[in-house]
Amino acid sequence: MNNFIVRNVIGLIGGVIFFAVYFYVPTIYFSLLLAFITGLIVLFEWKNIFKSNTVLFWIILPVYPILPFMFLILLNQSLQYRILLLFLFIIGFSFDIGSYYVGTLFGKHKLCPVISPGKTWEGFIGGCVFATLTMLIFYYWQRLTGSLMPLFLVTLFLSIILFLGDLFESMLKRRANIKDSGVLMPGHGGLLDRFDSILFASYFVYLLRDCLLQLIY
């Protein structure tokens, strides 16, 4: 129960700070925040997953997490594409929240027991439902004019990618025989645990940014 409370308090405080920087300070400061988070992950968490003197460490590091964070920063620095960054974050975080709470309360059927025993079908479906509800709120909040059906399909596909990103990091941790990537976010398993799915999905959002813009407007 104590871990549950810590997770919620830290998550709430972190979320408020994160989105406050996004909405209420100049754009460059949010990019600096993303760069700072990248540095923390690389310096304090990545070495827990891969030994820094291995070839694999230096091969994967640029592709994940550095390049995805660069995609996020590039989206943030563009007035045209910044709305896609917001969309990715709120869908990503809502999917994580839905997966965690629904999986914790109702999860019974294991989804990938070999890689991540804690993940369940109920949690995955809960994440998809939360992401879809958040998409609807986002649609009317931002007064978007695109058709809802394509955006619903994008949200569903994005949810699958988010899940795969979470699964990928679970696979890396299992390979390294560790439970958490770090201790920078108590109760959350580390910073990388909070951004793993979003980093994975950043490839999809950034590379298809023009198509996504046409869908939402």
Image (cartoon, helix red, strand yellow):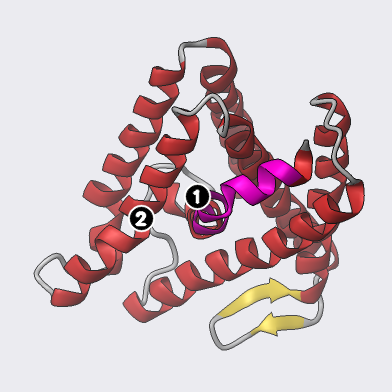
**What residue type is disc 2 on?**
Pro
Neighbours of disc 2 within 10 Å: few (<14), some (14-19), many (20+): many
Q: Count of labels shown?
A: 2
Tell me the quarter of the picture where residue 13 sits: top right
Q: Position of residue 196 (x, y in %)?
A: 49, 57
Disc 1 and disc 2 in contact, CB within 8 angstroms:
yes
Q: Is residue 4 visible?
A: no
Give the residue number, with chain letter if any, for mark 1. 195
* Magenta region: 202-214
Q: Residue at x 44, y 67 (%)?
A: 179
| In the image, residue 205 lies in the stretch drawn in magenta | yes
Q: Residue at x 78, y 36 (%)?
A: 217
Q: Quadrant of residue 141?
A: top right
Above or below: residue 79 compared with residue 182 = above
Instruction: Give the residue type that dot 1 points to.
Output: Phe
What residue is disc 2 on?
Answer: 65
* 1 or 2: tag closer to the N-terminus: 2
Provide residue 128's location: percent of width, then percent of height.
80, 59
Q: CA distance from mark 1 to mark 2?
A: 9 Å
Establish if 195 lies above or below 87.
below
